[in-house]
Image (cartoon, rainbow, N blue to C red):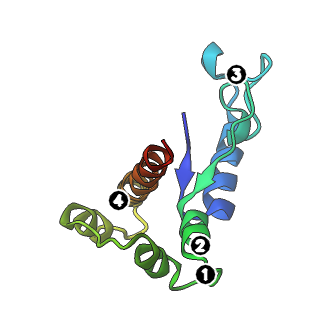
Amino acid sequence: MIFITDTPGFDYQFISDMLGRLKELPEEMQSGGTAPYSLNYLFGKYQPVCDINSFYKGVGGVLCKHGSRDRMMDQLNVQRPQWLVDVEDAYDHNPLNDAKAIAGRAAFYLSLTARDVAARKKAKK
């Protein structure tokens, strides 16, 4: 399982804090027989949380607050499809709407990089 947030500081810490308050979890979600103290150890082994904003900054090469996603889209030479525009229009800090927007962004942008990696591997052969 991969957790993807939009901002690592708030979302990650909030969910980790909520996990720390749980007294009991299903056995498969426990870490060493106890409830995990962070998302990194939710299923008993280390697995880092990813945030989509850092992905934009890394691919786009822009480390500022605004403009990293646009720069990334320029780098990948893509336009957002209408379904993604619709999902992102609902991004309003309602947890359910934000989760849909974050998941939509991750699905679309990560699929572009996977396609690019596959094309480069094919070109090397």
C-alpha separation, residue under disc 2 versus residue under disc 1? 5 Å
C-alpha separation, residue under disc 4 versus residue under disc 1? 26 Å
Q: Up-down: is 87 above or below 70?
A: above
Place residue 25 in its image quadrant: top right
Kindly give the residue lying farthest to the front in the view shown.
Answer: 125
Q: Which mark is residue 57?
A: 2
Q: Which mark is residue 97?
A: 4
Where in the figure is residue 85, as x and y percent of width and height? 26, 69
- In this rendering, would 33 be left or right of 92? right
Q: Earlier in the sequence, mark 2 or mark 4?
A: 2
Residue at horizontal 35 percent and vertical 59 percent from the top: 97
Q: Which mark is residue 62?
A: 1
Q: Mark 2 near mark 1, Cβ–Cβ under 8 Å? A: yes
Q: Residues within 10 Å of mark 1 (few under 14, many from 20)?
A: some
Q: What's the amino acid at mark 4?
A: Asn
Q: Indicate which label's residue lies in the foreground, 4 or 1.
A: 1
Q: Earlier in the sequence, mark 4 or mark 1?
A: 1
Judged from the image, the secondary structure of the residue bearing numbered disc 2 is: helix
Judged from the image, the secondary structure of the residue bearing numbered disc 1 is: loop
Q: Mark 3 near mark 4, Cβ–Cβ under 8 Å? A: no
Q: What's the amino acid at mark 1?
A: Val
* Residue at mark 3: 30
Residue at horizontal 73 percent and vertical 33 percent from the top: 41
Residue at horizontal 64 percent and vertical 47 percent from the top: 49
Where in the figure is residue 40, as x and y percent of width and height? 71, 39
Judged from the image, the secondary structure of the residue bearing numbered disc 3 is: loop
Observer-nearest of 55 and 61: 61
